[in-house]
Image (cartoon, grey):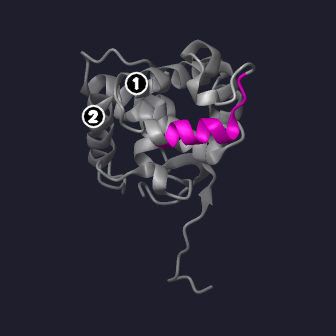
Amino acid sequence: MADDQKQAQFLPFHAINEFMRPDFRGEVVRSALQAVEASSENRGRLDQLTRKHVSVPGFRNSAKAPLGLRVKPIGEAFEKSPQLVAAILSAWAAARPELASRVHQLLTERGWTILPLEVERARLPGFLTHWPKGEDFEILVQAYQAAFPEAVESSDEISLMVVWISDRLPYDVDENDAQ
């Protein structure tokens, strides 16, 4: 392939598990499920994926199981199903519009090339593999906390939103300062 033709490389959404602690993954799943139950947005797709990928003992339809019984099996399926990861992260992010907006603003100001906030990232094939040189989660969390000192989000939440909004995992570090 010629140098002037670049092809995007994607990692499947469930590759994010390599960057998440199991306890935080459980928090994200629980939070996303609570958000979906509070509003019907994203519910149909998540219920469909739950029925397909999750088994809750005693329930023919796993999506009908109480939230407390679904968290652990959905967390386990989260490690294997890219579609389920996309649906969970989409619901999780939709429940945090202020964090999403702030992270989008921060990354744009830092020169990252990212999609508009309104784009449904769950429809993408996965995460891009290229990460801007000189950026890591610690630097981005510190920049976020400096830009928004009143913010109460944890470093894990900020880091996850950076991954979701940028649609990137720090797999390959770019030679350019920002991409």
* Residue 160 in picture, x, y percent from top left: 48, 33
Looking at the figure, which quarter contains the N terminus?
A: bottom right
Please state the extent of the stretch shown in magenta in the rendering: 45-56
Q: Give the residue at x 65% y 43%.
A: 14
User: Given the image, on which type of amino acid does mark 2 rest?
Assistant: Arg
Specify few, some or many for label 2: CA neighbours under 10 Å numbering under 14, 14-19, or 20 or more.
some
User: Which is more toward the observer, 32 or 45?
Assistant: 45
- Mark 2 to mark 1: distance in Å? 20 Å
Give how far across and how far down residue 97 sits, in percent: 29, 32
Q: Going by the image, does 177 lie left or right of 69?
A: left
Q: Is residue 96 visible?
A: yes
Instruction: Count every numbered label the image shows and give the total.
Output: 2
Image coordinates for residue 90, horizontal then vertical, percent: 44, 39
**What residue did someone put label 2 on?**
102
* Residue position for label 1: 35
SS under mark 2: helix
